[in-house]
């Protein structure tokens, strides 16, 4: 991506040379031996940014979903996947549920009375769904809808023929909802070099209620060590730990 303009210029120049039938210095040489362009050295995109570009390019999330990083925190916060909503309706007499998702589209309309309302398309790991926001809720939630951050939506559900109509009663930042739901992390370490980086990350999150333990695969046995104290265990902490070199995996507990 960082070299896109450079590559386009090179491709344009090559096309002009072919069209004009002009031979350059390397015309008689196998193309495999022609100088290759020097591309800029850049760091990988952070996972969330990579997913954003995936969606922008092909219209869906390819390598994973932005909500995957929340792990079991969604379940502990009482949040359903959209695909599980029909089963939840069948098993629960209430018609109010909590879902989570990323806003991927929005269509605003004006009612006959002149009030604005919106149909908002959202995506969770199980698929895409649409929620309806009426005037007052839409006005109060515009900043959140435009923020690009994951959201938790409390909806009233009504069956209409073969579809479900979801009317939003409340919208909150998902991070705020799950902040009190994560019980802790179990961190699997593959290399000792990861310990110092891990210490720096979790030290910034001290003072919460979450528990953290590290699991070491020693030659004789596997050892799990509980880190003393409580920590603020949120999705950002989980993602930051998982991205550290030498970390094999991170599980919610």
Image (cartoon, grey):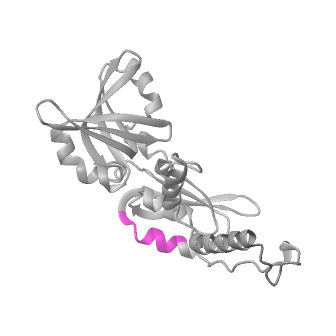
Looking at the picture, how far across and down is residue 215, in whole percent?
A: 61, 59
Instruction: Determine whether, in the image, residue 116 is placed left or right of residue 156.
Output: left
Residue 149's place in the image compared with 44, above or below, is: above
Q: Nearer the viewer, residue 37 or 227?
A: 37
Q: Nearer the viewer, residue 238 or 115?
A: 115
Q: For the image shown, how many numbered marks are present on the structure?
A: 0
Whether residue 155 appears in magenta in the rendering, the answer is no
Instruction: Determine whether, in the image, residue 29 is placed left or right of residue 190.
Output: right
Q: Report the residue at 30% width, 53% height from top.
A: 146
Q: Residue furthest front?
A: 20
Q: Report the residue at 46% width, 68% height from top.
A: 202
Q: Which residues are magenta?
A: 198-207
Q: Nearer the viewer, residue 77 or 39?
A: 39
Whether residue 206 appears in magenta in the rendering, the answer is yes
Looking at the picture, how far across and down is residue 3, in whole percent?
A: 60, 73
Q: Report the residue at 12% width, 36% height from top.
A: 114
Residue 250 sits in quarter = bottom right
Instruction: Determine whether, in the image, residue 190 is placed left or right of residue 47.
Output: right
- Dominant SS of magenta comes to helix
Residue 8 sits in quarter = bottom right
Residue 122's place in the image compared with 205, above or below, is: above
Looking at the picture, how far across and down is residue 119, in whole percent?
A: 30, 36
Residue 40 sits in quarter = bottom right
Q: Residue furthest top?
A: 161
Q: Residue furthest bottom?
A: 25
Looking at the picture, how far across and down is residue 205, in whole percent?
A: 40, 66
For the N terminus, which image quadrant?
Answer: bottom right
């Amino acid at each position: 991506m960082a070299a896109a303009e450079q590559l386009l210029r090179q491709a344009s120049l090559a096309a002009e040379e072919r069209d004009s039938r002009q031979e350059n210095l390397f015309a008689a040489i196998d193309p495999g031996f022609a100088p290759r362009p020097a591309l800029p050295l850049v760091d990988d995109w952070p996972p969330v940014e990579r997913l954003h570009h995936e969606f922008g390019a092909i219209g869906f999330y390819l390598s994973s979903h932005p909500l995957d990083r929340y792990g079991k925190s969604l379940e502990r916060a009482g949040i359903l996947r959209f695909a599980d909503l029909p089963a939840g309706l069948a098993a629960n007499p209430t018609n109010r549920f909590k879902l989570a998702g990323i806003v991927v589209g929005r269509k605003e309309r004006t009612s006959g009375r002149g009030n604005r309302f919106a149909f908002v398309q959202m995506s969770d790991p199980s698929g895409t769904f649409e929620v309806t926001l009426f005037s007052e809720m839409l006005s109060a939630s515009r900043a959140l809808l435009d923020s690009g951050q994951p959201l938790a939506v409390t909806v009233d559900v009504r069956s209409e023929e073969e579809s479900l109509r979801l009317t939003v009663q409340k919208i909150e930042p998902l991070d705020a909802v799950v902040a009190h739901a994560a019980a802790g992390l179990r961190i699997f370490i593959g290399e000792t070099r990861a310990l110092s980086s891990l210490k720096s990350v979790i030290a910034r999150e001290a003072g919460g209620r979450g528990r953290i333990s590290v699991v070491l695969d020693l030659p004789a046995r596997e050892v799990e060590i509980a880190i003393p104290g409580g920590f603020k265990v949120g999705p950002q902490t989980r993602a930051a730990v998982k991205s550290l070199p030498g970390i094999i995996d991170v599980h919610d507990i």
